[in-house]
Amino acid sequence: MKKDKIKRIANSNKVRLLLNQRYRKSFNQVKKYFCEINDSKKEELYKCLSEHFFSRFKNGYLDSDIGKNDMENHISRRLFRFRTTVIPWINTIISLKQSKILEIGCGTGSFTVPLAEQGCELTSIDVDDISVARKRCELYGLPVKLLPINALSVNEINDKFDMIIFSATLEHMTYDERLVSIKLAWDMLSKNGFLVVIDTPNRLYFYDDHSSILPFYHWLPDQIAMKYSKFSPRDMCKDIGCDEMKFMRFGRGASFHEFELALNIKCSDMEVYDMRSFLKTLASVNTKEFKYSNFLRKFVLSDISNGFYHSYLDIAIKKRD
């Protein structure tokens, strides 16, 4: 092997190791603030989820293997994932303690608790029922301001924030709703604040594992995608038919184009922080996702952050004006 190639590999491995060490340092900083609840409180949370969130499902759903797995996701697995991925990453961007943060799309509070336990001043909103999120925060003993507000009315809060987070939210909006809500959130950020997007599928990615579980589904025009949904292995996706609003609410990928349109800033001029690159390890660089991401950067637009090329958008954009 040539000396220059050996040197490149050595330097590359060193960078990856440093990234890994950076993660470990950040995780060790945040883990000391993790809150836990006992089995009795978990039972209360289970009951609240059953009565509110899972009431939309058919009788017997929670007794099925899929239902049991779904419930476990809402009780503990999502909490664990956010604590071990998103929170350590955000901790390298901003000091969560005493920062003013707005969470858009709190859902059942799986991400609300990991944020609040770090000591931030948190406001969380959702257009749907926030009963479970409120109960979860109560069980964990965390003070969170929870509001039943639509992202399109977020400016009614009339406040400034250090960070605003769209948590698995943008993909369930129409295209016009995305542009409006992104711009509203951007205007509510303090100088040097951060607009964060978590768990939104990227329409540039070749496989949709969020809604249809089909290849190239993100790339299809809406009218074709609606009709093609009948080939999805998911019954919920097959039922979309030609109902355009149901189709959009079920989940549709986003890309850097929405952010350029909403903020009127070219992506090449944005200061973007990428969670998946932060979490990169020696193992992950050999995955299809990273190879595809590198392919796009090399052959399409190399001056755009890698965060816009992964399967999901997990990014933070800094407001510099």
Image (cartoon, rainbow, N blue to C red):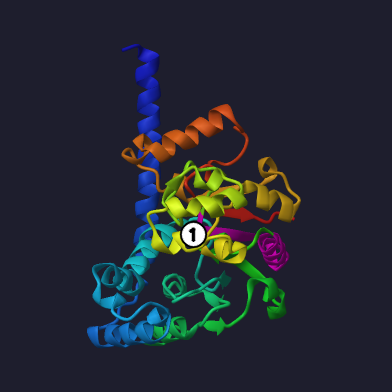
Q: Is residue 37 above or below residue 310?
A: below
Q: Is residue 313 above or below residue 156?
A: above
Residue at position x 43%, y 33% from top?
A: 291
Q: Give 187 or 170, whichever is nearer the viewer.
A: 170
Query: Label 1 belongs to which residue?
Result: 90
Residue 195 is inside the magenta segment:
yes
**Dot 1, crowdedness within 10 Å: few (<14), some or many (≥20)?**
many
Residue 129 is inside the magenta segment:
no
Find residue 284 and report its horizontal and vertical position in percent: 35, 41
Res. 175 image quadrant: bottom right
Q: Secondary structure at mark 1?
A: helix
Q: Amino acid at mark 1?
A: Ile
Res. 151 image quadrant: bottom right
| Residue 103 in view (yes/no) | yes
Find residue 5 and report its horizontal and vertical position in percent: 38, 17
Q: Give 15 or 224, whichever is nearer the viewer.
A: 224
Q: Is residue 7 above or below residue 286?
A: above
Find residue 253 and report its horizontal and vertical position in percent: 55, 53
Residue at position x 46%, y 71% from top?
A: 115
Would residue 40 be found to the left or right of residue 235 on screen?
left
| Residue segment shown in magenta | 176-200
Q: Give 120 or 230, whichever is nearer the viewer.
A: 230
Would residue 304 be found to the left or right of residue 106 on screen?
right
